Image (tube, helix red, strand yellow):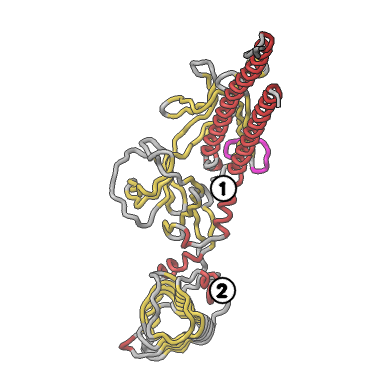
Amino acid sequence: MSVKARGFTVLELVLALGLFAVVMTAVSRVLLSQKRLYRELGQRADLSDNLRTAGDILGAELWGLDATDGDILAFGPDSITIRAQRAFALACSVSGGVLVLNRAMTFGVRDIAVGDSMLVYADSVWQSGVATAVSSAACPDSAQIPVRAYEIVTYRSYRASDGAYYIGVRDAGGLQPIVGPLVPGGLLFSYADTAGAPAAVARAIAFVRIRIRMQSAEPVNRRGVTALLGDSLSRWVTLRNNP
Amino acid sequence: MSLLTSVLMLVVSLALMAAGSVFLVNETRLSERSVSQLQSVGAAELVIAHALESWDPRNARHIGTGLYLVDRSGLGLLVRLKPVAFPQAALIAGGIVSLGPGARVEGPIDSSATGTGLTGDLDLSRVASMADLTIPGGRYGTLPAAPADGVIHIAGDAELGGGSGSGFLLVDGNLTVTGPLTFNGVVLVRGELVVSGSAALSTHLSGSVVTLMQATGDSSLWVTYDKALVINVLSRFGTPERLPSRSWTSLSQVG
């Protein structure tokens, strides 16, 4: 009587192990490349977000300017100093230099503060002043007067202590980073008048072109080469409060 | 299907998924940037132009004489109304003005006026389109109630037995007043105006009264010219224009 052999031969086991090794190698390479891809996409997404944020911030600051009325105090290829609006409000009354504002009708990035330049629309013109004190008072919702509050700020690129370049804003509180990192020289402004020609004086500026070149915060590896990712944004901003 | 074939299909699938995700992310990023640039350059101008073209003061916040704040999706636009040129008289008629004994008209009377001497540069069709209350012609015991300082438009000949109101009363046909009517603002009659009653039940019209045809009034008629009232009533019919400087603002709430 013959007995049928059970189990695998050595050759079958070697072949199976070999095939398993090949499959695992292929899978690990795929997983590794996926991990690199995920990291790169994360860096790209951050870079894209930073660019968009920088464009939105600078755009929002610049498009509310009235250059013909002196809102651009200094301008150059890598920096711009402006009278930036911080609040818009409706005043219930203007009497003896005291403005009573409607709190529910105050808009902007912050409340009006001491030291802000003020413009009050009275007698069909914007009249200027400075906020010397701020307090609370009752304000009936009656006929109202438009009021704008401004502060002077400078936007430029600067090198931080970590060696990277950032877009920064300088106001009364000093220089603060906004967004980055930039490539060196990665913030450029150019200025045009209503005809599209380069503007020679601040009051002639009708359009501002912002060019931002940024890089990723961390390097990524692509085909064995490790480098920072780069991207850029170019935006024309129309100064909408020009007459 | 062999194991090797399965492994190969798995690898190919993963490669396709990776390539697809890179493509989608890049496309999305490009689309977002294009939209962002478009918004920054043109969207606000379009909103401003549309706000002026489709101007209706009822959709804006009145913040002063002839001054409005339009809020469109967080965009604040200060709109100034170019004032309406309007004749400065208590009673203006395109035909003859016939006043009986005892009729009182406090202010200038312009009879047989024509063109801008009648209604200035006021667009009557625009006044009608902005009516707060439009009623057909007919006989009314009292002037139908309407919002204060609003526009009442009577589309035809009308007879009023009295009542009170304020704002702008526009009558497309003839208007006959038979009882004590008190109205503060502008009364504009495209046809003939007849006021009859008794001195004890006088009709008192403050502001300005205009009829494109003739006007007839007996002792019950009492018209008082009020320039400030006329300017205030007509202020909403001016031509909208953005302030010459600093008309635009963002209306995001202080955070």
Helix, strand or loop at disc 2?
helix
Amino acid tagged 2: Thr
Q: Residue A195 appears at what percent x and percent y?
A: 67, 43
Residue A202 counted in the magenta span: yes
Q: Which residue sits at x=68%, y=25%?
A: B6
Judge from the rendering whether residue A106 lies leftward or rightward of residue B115; answer left or right.
left
Q: Which mark is residue A2?
A: none
Q: Which residue sits at x=58%, y=30%?
A: A48
Along the viewing direction, whichever of A43 and A215 lies nearer the viewer: A43
Q: Which residues are magenta?
A: A194-204
Which of disc 2 and disc 1 is earlier in sequence?
A: 1
Judge from the rendering whether residue B124 lies leftward or rightward of residue B178; answer left or right.
right
For the residues bearing labels 1 and 2, Cβ distance under 8 angstroms:
no
Q: Which residue sits at x=36%, y=36%?
A: A114
Secondary structure predominantly adopted by residues drawn in magenta: loop
Q: Chain under label 1?
A: B
Residue at label 1?
B44
Q: Residue B147 appears at what percent x and percent y?
A: 39, 70
Residue at label 2?
B116
Res B72 visible: yes
Q: Which quadrant would residue A171 be assigned to in this image? A: top left
Helix, strand or loop at disc 1?
helix
Res B108 visible: no
Q: Chain under label 2?
A: B
